[in-house]
Image (cartoon, rainbow, N blue to C red):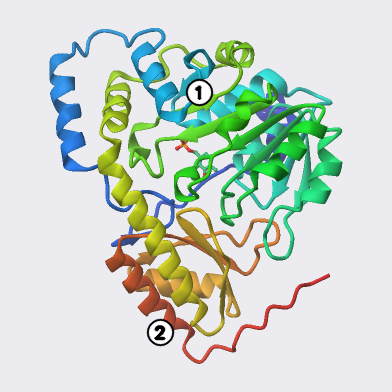
């Protein structure tokens, strides 16, 4: 009998799966979630709506009320909105309708793992341009590489580094590229910047957003995409019918209607990020990088796995990002509640006490 795995595409067998070790910890600051959870008033309104609905019926084929709320919320036209079961589903849908053998996908690195993984699974070629030593987008190199790319995927603010692309740099890329540019704005609320206004001028721009981060709904799986309607119609062919369930639709609609209750949480997360970053500057043996998202990437002069384990022993779970390109000495911490951030800082100071002062040496 032939090996059953010989049926699996070689491109799939070559890639490593995207996984996450599900460790439990009292302080969970590893997945860039909103540490405050959905405000009770929003939860209560969603439960009321769900009580009035028949659970036995399929959701609407196209959830038009949610789509028009998303259009108003984001300042874009409703025929240019597509909703997904998390933005992951929409990343997959975009790549499914564009990537095949010979297609070139440009990604800055390090970045969110899924872009490269799905590109390779679909048979495309992933071209990578590294961030600068300061972990900023290398615009000159991107401008050069984007000319030949079918797709350019920019995560801004970038996971896991927190780097932000400026509107003028993105405009330059949109002008010179031969292909589509996807901007993943999963963390845009924390940067107080959005590239959405550029949709009016550039038909080749696709913006991705999620309810999993600032909107406190990671467990409910809602994402959306904003693009020119002609593109949306094609990408929609690759998403599954009824991809959003009635609970998630009701929750997303309610969250938008009550956004004024979420905004103070977002403001506090931004304030805490700045406090955390400031305090991390004073910890010996550690270099934190500025971030426009709700997380901070930091380099340690100790082995990052030793720091990870010591934090975990203290009940604190952060993200090990040391396998990402350029980040072999790095961990990433999500901004938690003020109390969680205090615990994290205290633990970090204890672990790194006496560590060699970190001398940042750009390796050329
Ligand atoms: C940059 C980026 N895009 C997309 C996602 C996935 O979001 P969702 O929960 O909407 O699928 C994440 C989640 O970590 C992310 O960091």
Quadrant showing the N terminus: top right
User: Which residue does the numbered mark 2 point to in the structure image?
Assistant: 350
Question: Residue 91: which quarter of the image?
Answer: top right
Q: Secondary structure at mark 2?
A: helix
Would you place residue 86 above or below residue 14 in this image? Answer: above
Residue 93 in the image: above or below residue 13: above
Q: Where is residue 241 drawn, in percent x and y?
A: 45, 11
The residue depicted at 47 percent of the width and 16 percent of the height is 78
Quadrant of the rendered structure where residue 97 is?
top right
Residue 296 at x, y = what percent?
Answer: 51, 62
Q: In this view of the protein, which residue sits in the foreground, 51 or 204? A: 204
Is the Cβ of the residue at disc 1 closer than 8 Å to that at disc 2?
Answer: no
* Front residue (pair 71, 315): 71
Residue 176 lies, with reference to residue 243, above or below; the image says below
Judge the density around disc 1: few (<14), some (14-19), many (≥20) Cα neighbours within 10 Å: some
Question: Which element carries disc 1, helix, strand or loop?
Answer: loop
The CA span between labels 1 and 2 is 48 Å
Most foreground residue, 86 or 183: 183
- 195 left or right, relative to 326: left
Residue 128 as seen in the image, left or right of residue 68: right
Q: Which mark is residue 277?
A: none
Residue 360, by quadrant, is bottom right
Is the CB atom of the residue marked by disc 2 within 8 angstroms of ligand 1's nearest atom?
no
List the residue tagged with mark 1: 76
Q: Position of residue 338 (x, y in %)?
A: 30, 65
């Amino acid at each position: 009998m032939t090996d059953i795995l010989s049926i699996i595409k070689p491109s799939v067998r070559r890639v490593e799966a995207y996984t996450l070790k599900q460790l439990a910890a009292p302080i969970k600051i590893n997945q860039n979630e909103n540490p405050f959870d959905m405000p009770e008033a929003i939860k209560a309104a969603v439960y009321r709506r769900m009580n009035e609905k028949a659970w036995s019926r399929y959701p609407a084929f196209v959830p038009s009320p949610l789509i028009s709320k998303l259009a108003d919320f984001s300042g874009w036209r409703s025929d240019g909105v597509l909703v997904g079961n998390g933005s992951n589903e929409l990343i997959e849908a975009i790549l499914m309708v564009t990537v095949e053998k010979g297609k070139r996908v440009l990604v800055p690195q390090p970045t969110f793992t899924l872009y490269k993984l799905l590109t390779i699974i679909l048979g495309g070629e992933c071209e990578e341009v590294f961030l600068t030593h300061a972990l900023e987008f290398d615009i000159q190199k991107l401008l050069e590489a984007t000319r030949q790319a079918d797709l350019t995927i920019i995560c801004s603010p970038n996971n896991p580094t927190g780097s932000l692309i400026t509107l003028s740099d993105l405009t330059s890329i949109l002008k010179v590229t031969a292909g589509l540019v996807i901007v993943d704005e999963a963390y845009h609320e924390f940067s107080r910047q959005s590239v959405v206004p550029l949709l009016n001028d550039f038909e080749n721009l696709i913006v991705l957003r999620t309810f999993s981060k600032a909107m406190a709904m990671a467990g409910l799986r809602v994402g959306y995409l904003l693009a020119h309607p002609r593109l949306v119609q094609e990408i929609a062919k690759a998403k599954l019918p009824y991809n959003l369930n009635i609970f998630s639709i009701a929750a997303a609609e309610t969250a938008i209607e009550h956004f004024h209750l979420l905004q103070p949480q977002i403001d506090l997360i931004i304030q805490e990020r700045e406090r955390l970053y400031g305090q991390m500057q004073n910890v010996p043996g550690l270099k934190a990088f500025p971030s426009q998202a709700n997380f901070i990437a930091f380099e340690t002069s100790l082995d990052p796995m030793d720091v990870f384990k010591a934090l975990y022993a203290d009940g604190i779970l952060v993200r090990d990002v040391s396998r990402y390109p350029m980040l072999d000495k790095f961990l990433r911490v999500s901004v938690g509640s003020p109390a969680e951030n205090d615990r994290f800082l205290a633990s970090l100071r204890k672990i790194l006490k006496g560590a060699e002062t970190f001398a940042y040496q750009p390796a050329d």
